[in-house]
Image (cartoon, rainbow, N blue to C red):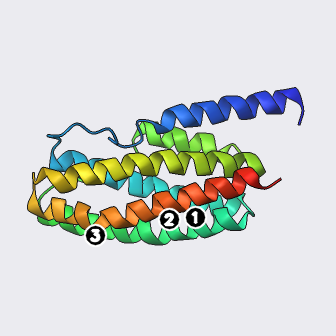
């Protein structure tokens, strides 16, 4: 890899790692509203669906492809449940990805091969750590019983995704 490509990869990786930190309100202080949870969860679901499709186009790594397929399936299902519950509770859903998440998608879309695999895995580990915290916080909040119940039912799915993301990250970093 020439120095320019290495530098581009290093900058993109560092940017993605730092940008993933506020992906969702992972370190969410207690007292956030049900509306905040719905907004964050819906945006995260939309991003995971888009990234799953992107990974299926960009990667040939079996671990990445398997993870991406699972993200598409599960986050589509979670999004349908979220939409149904939010509407019944008269909560607003975002129409599109917020600019920060759209920017993260653009960053990943510029990578390919092993660079993409590593960045996608790292991004998903950090993002799912934050999503676990968001879902736990909402589960405990009891701001809205239906939304708290949704968070409680989605939490094991998100925790499983975190475990899968860690295994994927290990697979893409240990392969030569």
10 relative to 54 in the view: left or right: right
162 relative to 152 in the view: left or right: right
Q: Which residue is mark 3?
A: 81
Q: Residue 3 at x, y = what percent?
A: 86, 27
Q: Are marks 2 and 1 in contact (CB under 8 Å)?
A: yes
Disc 3, SS:
helix
Q: Which residue is mark 1?
A: 68
- For image coordinates 43% across by 37% down, the residue present is 99
Tell me, for residue 71, which label it has, or none.
Answer: 2
Disc 3 packing (10 Å; few <14; some 14–19; many ≥20): some
Tell me, for residue 152, which label it has, or none.
Answer: none
Q: Are marks 2 and 3 in contact (CB under 8 Å)?
A: no
Disc 1, SS:
helix
Residue extending furthest toward the right: 2
Disc 2 packing (10 Å; few <14; some 14–19; many ≥20): many
- For image coordinates 43% across by 70% down, the residue present is 74
């Amino acid at each position: 890899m020439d120095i320019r490509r290495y530098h581009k990869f290093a900058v993109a990786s560092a940017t993605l790692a730092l940008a993933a930190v506020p992906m969702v309100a992972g370190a969410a202080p207690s007292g956030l509203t049900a509306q905040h949870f719905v907004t964050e969860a819906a945006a995260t679901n939309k991003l995971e669906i888009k990234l799953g499709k992107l990974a299926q186009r960009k990667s040939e790594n079996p671990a990445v492809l398997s993870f991406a397929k699972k993200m598409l399936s599960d986050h589509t299902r979670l999004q349908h449940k979220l939409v149904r519950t939010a509407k019944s509770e008269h909560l607003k859903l975002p129409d599109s990805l917020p600019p920060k998440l759209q920017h993260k998608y653009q960053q990943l879309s510029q990578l390919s091969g092993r660079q993409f695999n590593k960045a996608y895995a790292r991004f998903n580990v950090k993002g799912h750590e934050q999503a676990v915290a968001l879902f736990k916080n909402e589960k405990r909040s009891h701001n809205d019983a239906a939304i708290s119940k949704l968070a409680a039912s989605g939490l094991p799915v998100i925790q499983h995704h975190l475990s899968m993301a860690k295994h994927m990250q290990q697979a893409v970093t240990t392969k030569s």
